[in-house]
Amino acid sequence: MLDEAFIHIVRVDIDPEHEAAFNAWYEQRHFPDLLACPGWLSAKRFVSIGDGPKYAAMYEVAGRWAFETPE
């Protein structure tokens, strides 16, 4: 149970001035780089329709060990 798979969720707001660059980086660089690392199984982005940060990303992670790999 200590190192079971889990869902990692990140929520963030971005200054509109940098939003286009942020979105391009997230899709073209961040997701591919992260998913190439051991233990990062899937990634998906969302835009909030309610209160709170505008963007959310949901990652399926094989275990906490995935945060500690050299990659």
Image (spheres, grey):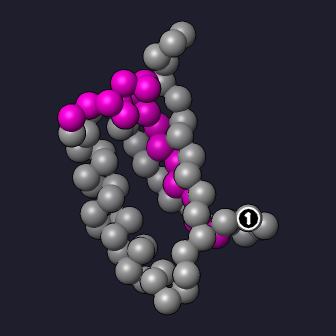
Q: For the N terminus, which image quadrant?
A: top right
Q: Position of residue 32 (x, y in %)?
A: 27, 54
Indicate whether 32 appears above or below 20.
above
- Amino acid, disc 1: Gly
Residue named by callout 1: 52
Q: Is residue 52 magenta?
A: no
Left or right: 67 with respect to 33? right
Q: Quadrant of residue 27?
A: bottom left
Q: Residue at x 48, y 81 (%)?
A: 19
Q: Position of residue 12 (x, y in %)?
A: 58, 63
> Which residues lie in the magenta part?
54-70
**As rendered, which of 48 and 19 lies closer to the eye?**
19
Q: Residue at x 27, y 63 (%)?
A: 29
Farthest residue, direction top: 1
**As rendered, which of 7 and 65 lies closer to the eye?**
65
Indicate whether 16 appears above or below 5.
below
